[in-house]
Structure formats: C-alpha cells, structure tokens
C-alpha cells in the first residue's frame, strides 16, 4: 500500500455534482482532492472516436466513443475483460433500468442532452397532495435559490416569460442567464400539432449557450451532435469544469476506483480506499468526504463498505441504502409521415410538453413528459433504406424520404420511490474483484396505468396529428438515464439515508448529494435538481468545516 494522500474535502466522482461541490469548497479556501474511477480524455479524442466508429455503432450507442477501461467498465458495454455485463438486472421491467453512464472524468455529462427542468412545488408534495410516493423534507421555496445558482453555474438558456413557464407554477428569483434557442421547423410543426389537442410544447431550458459565449464556452452552432459529445463544447459538461477546478488548486486523481469507505471513532469517516490500474490499494484521508459517484455507484460503494460498526453497510442503519431506485420509464414511437418534417435543426432536444406531468390524476397514475426528438434522421434513414436492399437512385430517393418524413416521439413517466426497487451486491465480480451491482426493477402499476390509460393513446394522437402513415411503439419500457434514489433524503433516520443537506444520518462528515438523495422523480429531467442539491450540500460542507 502506498503512503496516504489527504485533503480537507475528498470528493469521489467527477460528474456535475462532484464538480460543483469541489468548486464551492475551493472558493471557500478548503483543499480538495477528487477521485475518478475512469480515465481523463480530451474532447478531440472523443470526437475522433465517434467519427471512426463502424456504422452499426453510430446510432444509439452513445457510450461507444468512450471505450471503457477494464477497471472501470460501463453499464451496457461488455469489454474483452468481462464475460458478463457489469450491471446485473432482474425484475419485471429490468430493461427499463439498463442505464448509460460512462466512467470517465466528467461522467455522464459528456453525453447528456443538457435539459434542465426544475421540479414543481406539487412534485415535492406527492404524498400530502395525492397520497402516493413521499413528500420532500422541504418545499420548493427552499430549493429555489439553489435552482437559480445551478442555472448560472451550468449556463442554462431558457424562456423567462410567463407564457412559457406554465404549467410549472414555479416562482423564479432571476431570469435564465440566456434566452431560449429558437425552434427548428420540425419542432414548430410538433408544437402546432400538440396545441390542437390541448398540449403545450414549450422551449426546454438547456445547459448550452444560445447565441453568446458563457463561462468560456462558445455559442451553440447546431451541430446536432449533443450526444455522444458536443464537438465544440457549447453544452455544459463536467469535463469543462475540471481545468477550472485545477486552476483553483483542486487536485484530480483519475483511474482511482474507490472500493471502501473506512469509519473510525464515533463512526466518522476516516478514509477511502481505492485501487489503481495495477490493482494496488491506496488510502486517502480527509476531514470531510463526499460520495458523488451517481445513484448506482454511490449505494454500491456504501454496501461494499460494511464493517463492525456498520454491518449493513456505511450510512445504512435504516436499511434504505440501495432502495427506492428510480428512473423515468420511457416509451418511444417511431413514426413515418406523409410529408417532410425535417428534424435536426438545432440541439437534439429543445422542447417538452409538461402540462401532462401535473394534475389530480397523479393519485391514480403517473404524470409524464412528452417530446419529439430533434435528432437529425439522415443516419437512421440511410440505415433503414439499406436494409431494404435498394441500390442506385432508388436507394438515394428512399434515404431522402426517410430522413425527412420520419420522427421519434418520446414519453418519460414519473416514477415512485418504491423500496423493492433495490440495488444489492451481486456475487459476480468485476476485473478488480469488486462485487458488481445488481438491481431489481419494476416500473409499478402506477406507471403501467399511465401508459395504458393516457400516454400511449396520447402518443398515437400526436402521431396522427403529424400525418403518420406508420407508428411503431416500443413493446417495453426503456431507460431514460436519469438515475435517482438509492440514498433517499428525509428527516427520520429510521426511514431515510441523508438529511436535508444530503449529510448521512449515521456519519457526521459524510455527504451523499445528487440524484441518489432525491425523494421523488417527477416526469422531467433530474440533472438541475441534482445540481441544486449539490450546491445546498456545498453550503453545509463549507459551514461545517469553517466552524469545526
């Protein structure tokens, strides 16, 4: 074992949550060391990886430009070193929890779409309003200042006019840093069709620059390549934060797979232990520890770290670590139209229908967010035309038709925090000999009723309004890659893992911020809420260390 390393604040994970906490701690004069399981990579390398992929991997395989290291496998990618997938899945809807994050410095923000919706006041009071799920430990008014800070930290563009804020019911203390990105022709057509059936498609707030530079990032130029990577860095990804963290004095250690949290006197965390690529173990000490891996890797690490004082795992006296796993179960409709729609102008996602997430119906079935994917269809059209065996002018004509006259409609359903949706440790081990994560997942009747009674019929109505000649709806629920739950927040240590500042109930110097702490999932994207919770935790971290 090598000699110890140390810092005031030790952050495990270099995604958006870890980076926001690291910057806040550094700005307060604290020393910071960040640990990342995977490698660090430059943007040009990811772009070149994508350009050189075989055609079969260029559509829908967003992790493909990020080849995994043996010590840090991705969830859905089997490496030559792995005989079985890293993530072990079971349950009635196991496919709906496949997930798609990368274990690289910068995390999943490399290939996220950049959408930054806030939760609504009603989203945080599901139990008291509708008798389902949980209430949050605080209301929207407490989170609002952190939402605003998060929008300015990430560089979010969006509409601040009241017409485009409904049906969220959110009060805002400041406008977005930048105005919205205009709709392309396909999105405008979809907006008009939705309005005819009483649905409001509005510009989505996005962590990308709309016409101006921000935080040293250039303005979006509409590459329509937001995933698997923004080639120019107009979209926020945590990789753009890492040089800034280093410039402030933070240290970043990559290829460091943390496998154990060590506790000591009064059950405070003493150190974390990690393996390097040669399978050598190292120990890092600190005053305060932040586990910001994500909603899968964080509970996995806590369970791996059981000891004499914590026989069920670190932070797990409540037996809630690994429970309440959430993602928004997704259904898609692939649509052929009778005339051109022309998606692909601007970012891959730029708008959403959200009035379908709110209402009294939530006592019976899930709310859901609808959108039309704005991804350019030419690669998809070419692949589909080639499968028909066409050649010459016939092939060219069919590529043009399918590129212009097809679309994908998506609906993402609100999940409930359910204790039986659970992460446990598999008996199967990864390359380093660490137990792989195992997840049991069932979307629940709450979601199934929503699909049957509302969302699937609505998808069909939207498709018909667009002039669909063919509609194919996915036969099973899919993952949305919005990982939530696993370290749920609450005021009662017997029924939750962390307090209102994402501090572990059982350990005074351990914080577990981000999606894992979220009490409910709602139907909209989770990243902005994760970031707001990170900033709230950062304030508590700085206050705790400055007054200790």
Image: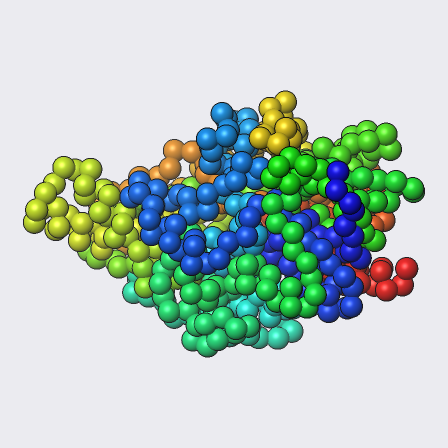
Q: Position of residue 414 (x, y in %)?
A: 55, 45
* For residue 237, side relative to residue 389 (left or right): right
| Front in this rendered view, residue 189 or 303 | 303
Please name the residue shown 14% across and 37% down the image: 389
Q: Hey, which quadrant is residue 303 in on the image?
A: top right
| Front in this rendered view, residue 68 or 517 | 68
Q: Position of residue 510 (x, y in %)?
A: 79, 48
Q: Position of residue 251 (x, y in %)?
A: 68, 58
* For residue 345, side relative to residue 353 (left or right): left
Please name the residue shown 36% across and 60% down the image: 224
Q: Hey, which quadrant is residue 23 in on the image?
A: bottom right
Q: Is residue 191 visible to us here?
A: no
Return the residue found at the far front.
2
Please name the residue shown 90% across and 59% down the image: 548
User: Number of marks in the image?
Assistant: 0
Q: Is residue 181 visible to us here?
A: yes
Q: Position of residue 299 (x, y in %)?
A: 68, 39
* For residue 501, side relative to residue 365 (left or right): right
């Amino acid at each position: 074992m090598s000699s110890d390393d140390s810092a005031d604040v030790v952050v495990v994970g270099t995604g958006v949550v870890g980076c926001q906490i690291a910057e806040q701690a550094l700005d307060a004069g604290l020393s910071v060391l960040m640990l990342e399981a995977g490698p660090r990579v430059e943007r040009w390398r990811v772009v070149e990886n994508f350009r050189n992929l075989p055609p079969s991997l260029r559509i829908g395989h967003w992790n493909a430009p990020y080849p995994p290291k043996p010590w840090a496998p991705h969830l859905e990618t089997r490496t030559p070193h792995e005989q079985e997938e890293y993530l072990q899945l079971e349950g009635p809807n196991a496919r709906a929890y496949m997930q798609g994050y990368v274990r690289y410095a910068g995390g999943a923000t490399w290939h996220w779409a950049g959408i930054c919706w806030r939760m609504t006041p009603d989203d945080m009071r599901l139990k008291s309003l509708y008798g389902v799920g949980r209430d949050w430990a605080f209301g929207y008014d407490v989170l609002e200042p952190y939402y605003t800070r998060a929008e300015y930290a990430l560089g979010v563009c969006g509409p601040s006019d009241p017409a485009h804020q409904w049906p969220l019911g959110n009060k805002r203390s400041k406008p977005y840093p930048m105005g919205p990105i205009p709709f392309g022709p396909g999105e405008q057509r979809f907006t008009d069709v939705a309005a005819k059936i009483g649905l409001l498609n509005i510009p989505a707030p996005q962590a990308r620059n709309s016409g101006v530079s921000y935080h040293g990032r250039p303005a979006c130029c509409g590459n329509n390549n937001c995933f698997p990577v923004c080639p120019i860095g107009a979209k926020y990804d945590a990789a753009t934060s890492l040089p800034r963290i280093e410039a402030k004095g933070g240290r970043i250690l990559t290829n460091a797979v943390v496998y154990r949290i060590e506790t000591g006197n009064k059950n405070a965390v003493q150190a974390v232990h990690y393996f390097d690529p040669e399978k050598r173990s190292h120990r890092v000490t600190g005053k305060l520890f932040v586990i910001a891996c994500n909603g899968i890797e964080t509970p996995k690490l806590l369970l791996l770290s059981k000891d004499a004082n914590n026989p069920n795992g670190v932070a797990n006296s409540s037996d809630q670590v690994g429970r309440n796993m959430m993602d928004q179960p997704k259904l898609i409709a692939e649509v052929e139209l009778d005339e051109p729609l022309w998606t692909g102008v601007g970012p891959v996602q730029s708008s959403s229908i959200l009035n379908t997430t709110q209402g009294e119906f939530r006592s019976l079935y899930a709310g859901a967010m609808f959108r039309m994917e704005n991804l350019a269809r030419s690669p998809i059209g070419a692949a589909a035309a080639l499968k028909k065996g066409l050649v010459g002018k016939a092939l060219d004509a069919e590529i043009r038709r399918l590129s212009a006259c097809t679309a994908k409609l998506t609906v993402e359903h609100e999940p409930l925090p359910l204790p039986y949706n659970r992460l446990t440790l598999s008996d199967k081990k990864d390359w380093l000999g660490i137990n792989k994560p195992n997840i049991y997942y069932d979307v629940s009747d709450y979601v199934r009723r929503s699909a049957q009674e509302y969302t699937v019929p609505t998808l069909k109505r939207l498709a018909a309004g667009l002039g669909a000649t063919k509609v194919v709806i996915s036969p099973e629920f899919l993952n949305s890659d919005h990982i939530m739950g696993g370290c749920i927040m609450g005021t009662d240590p017997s029924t939750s893992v962390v307090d209102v500042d994402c501090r572990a109930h059982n350990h005074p110097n351990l914080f577990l911020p981000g999606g894992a702490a979220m009490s409910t999932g709602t139907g909209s994207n989770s990243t902005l809420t994760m970031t707001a919770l990170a900033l709230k935790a950062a304030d508590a971290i700085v206050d705790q260390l400055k007054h200790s």
